[in-house]
């Protein structure tokens, strides 16, 4: 209804300013040419339209009353005078932006996360973001208002993508308070924004409009949005679209051939292009490694001096670049393995291990023991960025060695890889817990939640496989997994994240089993995304046959208090951890894992 009201208002403005039905306007001298005079006419028209019977009927028909006085009196939310008739997409997007009071609250709550989003860390000489993104709440309000009045579809789409990132971090509890006045519930508003963003991106990339550098930034922000939502496949597609358009604009070339009017503009444009290209290829290689898919940007197009030609490049940028390069090497190895070139697989892994050791040496030791009170000069955003980088480092190292964890049981040559994989899996859990403790307010990122869980499930699978062969560290690791389950449970309770809900439930069941108890169903199966199938069976009476899927066993234990370590079984594939294409859904990581157990691609021999 709010969108319909805005549409009627825009239609009435268009009709009145094109000379139709002038008798209804309470103004004279329609032929005046002064822009100030036209603005005065527009203001009088707005006042008249506010009192129009149809507008009043629509406003009073709304189920949720909106603070229309703030929105209608804000000239920045209205079409510019030079373009009174706006497209339907722009009109719908304006209807999705909350009133100013609510908008400022959303920006204030999300402000602490801006610096960890892509494109926000690169600043020019005047401490302004070279990508035109805001650095303060006041800048953000102006950024949104200016974008809504822009005639560029790419700028409008970038504004919507950036606003979605802010809205995404809004805790659900805040949307129920009287101070917030959203056009609709948060979940519905996010869905509407995503739909309009898809339409806007499609229009921006049409053959009539071509492509510009703002559109590339839209793809990057869109990829970050989908990563936070736990949709890495959709993020991967956005990155690929960004890479394709960046190549068409020539950003992959080492030298820019465009001549600018001033040196400052040239330096600013060149820095912006480098930042975009660097972000795109790094996201391309990182997401491809996680998904087990080929990357898009060939190694020949990666500039050797990317980020290293600055006077004092940020250490975080150097580490991320080196880490992304390792991700590309892992992709190459895995793709060769999937083509059955097994003889060179571990040789490649040894070579990558040397590169990973170089990355490890770049990371300062104090990062591993980071405590906010001991680092007074480090902002929370920078600390968040460093902890996220550590989490990605351990993820990369885990995926490097994980394929050989299974082989280590039969060949001691791979024992070192098993040790490094389990070490990184444990470090992923510890880093995630420190990251959650570091930020006072909970943040929404389903992908980070899943990364921590993926490390925890590797540890749980290894402990379950060992059975009765306990070590001194077993109890410590189970307690660590219990803490991870509790942290994911709190995140699920506060933010309602489906990934955290399911991950916490899996770890909770595994932890209870480790303590000798289980109250779940007799046969519990689910497919853990990018890992494999997990089966849990309840302990039965001695001699009773248990059938769980294709898993058939007989309980021989006569002691009801004895822990049955054969209750848990994991089946996984060595080099391919992704879903088959027919199981892809819009939710991706957030879909119901129990619905995905019918999967023939995983090795039935178990973990």
Image (cartoon, rainbow, N blue to C red):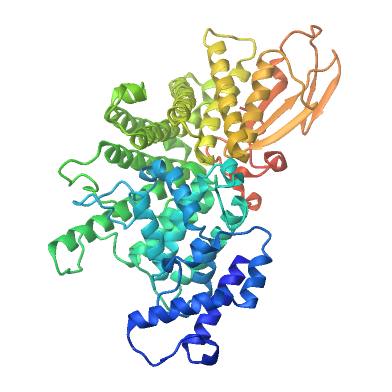
Q: Is residue 182 left or right of residue 328?
A: right
Query: Residue 499: x, y in percent?
Result: 60, 38
Q: Is residue 459 left or right of residue 36?
A: right
Q: Is residue 150 visible?
A: yes
- The residue lying at 68 percent from left, 18 percent from top is 512
Query: Residue 581: x, y in percent?
Result: 61, 52
Q: Quadrant of residue 507?
A: top right
Query: Residue 483: x, y in percent?
Result: 56, 21
Figure quadrant of the N terminus: bottom right
In the figure, 14 relative to 525: above or below?
Answer: below
Q: Nearer the viewer, residue 492 or 448?
A: 492
Figure quadrant of the C terminus: top right
Query: Residue 482: x, y in percent?
Result: 59, 20
Q: Is residue 339 visible?
A: no
Q: Nearer the viewer, residue 103 or 494?
A: 103
Q: Nearer the viewer, residue 242 or 373?
A: 373
Q: Is residue 202 left or right of residue 276?
A: right
């Amino acid at each position: 209804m709010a969108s319909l009201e805005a549409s009627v208002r825009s239609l009435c403005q268009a009709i009145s300013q094109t000379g139709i039905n002038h008798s209804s306007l309470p103004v004279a001298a329609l032929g005046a040419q002064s822009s100030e005079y036209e603005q005065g006419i527009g203001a009088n028209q707005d006042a008249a339209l506010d009192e129009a019977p149809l507008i009043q009927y629509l406003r009073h028909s709304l189920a949720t009353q909106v603070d229309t006085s703030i929105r209608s009196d804000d000239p920045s939310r209205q079409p510019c005078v030079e373009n009174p008739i706006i497209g339907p997409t722009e009109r719908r997007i304006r209807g999705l932006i909350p009133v100013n009071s609510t908008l400022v609250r959303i920006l204030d709550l999300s402000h602490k996360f801006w610096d960890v989003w892509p494109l926000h860390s690169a600043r020019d000489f005047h401490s302004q973001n070279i990508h035109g993104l805001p650095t303060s709440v006041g800048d953000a309000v102006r950024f949104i208002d200016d974008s809504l009045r822009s005639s560029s579809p790419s700028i409008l789409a970038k504004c919507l993508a950036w606003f979605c990132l802010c809205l995404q971090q809004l805790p659900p509890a805040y949307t129920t308070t009287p101070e917030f006045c959203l056009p609709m519930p948060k979940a519905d508003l996010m869905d509407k924004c995503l739909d309009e963003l898809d339409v806007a991106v499609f229009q921006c990339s049409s053959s009539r409009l071509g492509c510009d550098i703002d559109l590339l930034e839209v793809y990057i922000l869109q990829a970050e949005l989908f990563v936070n939502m736990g949709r890495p496949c959709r993020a991967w597609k956005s990155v690929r679209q960004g890479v394709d358009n960046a190549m068409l604009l020539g950003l992959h070339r080492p030298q820019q051939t465009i001549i600018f009017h001033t040196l400052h503009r040239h330096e600013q444009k060149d820095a912006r292009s480098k930042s975009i290209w660097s972000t795109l290829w790094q996201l391309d290689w990182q997401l491809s490694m996680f998904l087990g898919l080929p990357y898009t940007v060939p190694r020949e197009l990666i500039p050797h001096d990317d980020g290293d030609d600055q006077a004092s490049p940020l250490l975080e940028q150097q580490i991320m670049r080196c880490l992304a390069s390792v991700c590309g090497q892992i992709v190459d190895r895995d793709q060769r393995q999937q083509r059955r070139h097994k003889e060179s697989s571990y040789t490649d892994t040894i070579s990558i291990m040397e590169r990973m050791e170089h990355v490890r040496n770049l990371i300062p030791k104090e990062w591993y023991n980071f405590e906010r009170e001991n680092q007074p000069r480090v902002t929370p955003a920078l600390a968040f960025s460093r902890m996220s980088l550590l989490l990605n480092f351990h993820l990369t190292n885990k995926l490097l060695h994980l394929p050989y964890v299974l082989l280590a049981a039969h060949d001691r040559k791979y024992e070192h890889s098993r040790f490094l994989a389990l070490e990184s899996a444990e470090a992923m859990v510890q880093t995630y817990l420190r990251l959650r403790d570091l930020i006072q307010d909970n943040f929404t990122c389903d992908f980070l939640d899943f990364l921590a869980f993926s490390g925890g499930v590797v540890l749980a699978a290894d402990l379950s496989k060992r059975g009765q062969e306990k070590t001194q560290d077993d109890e410590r690791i189970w307690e660590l997994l219990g803490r991870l389950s509790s942290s994911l449970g709190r995140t699920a309770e506060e933010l309602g994240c489906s990934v955290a809900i399911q991950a916490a439930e899996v770890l909770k069941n595994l932890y209870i089993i480790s303590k000798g108890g289980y109250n779940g169903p007799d046969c519990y199966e689910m497919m853990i995304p990018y890992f494999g199938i997990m089966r849990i069976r309840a302990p039965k009476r001695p001699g009773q046959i248990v059938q769980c899927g294709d898993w058939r066993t007989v309980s021989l234990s006569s002691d009801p208090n004895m822990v049955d370590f054969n209750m848990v079984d994991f089946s996984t594939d060595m080099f391919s951890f992704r879903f088959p294409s027919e199981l892809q859904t819009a939710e991706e990581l957030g879909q119901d894992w129990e619905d995905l157990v019918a999967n023939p691609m995983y090795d039935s021999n178990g973990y």
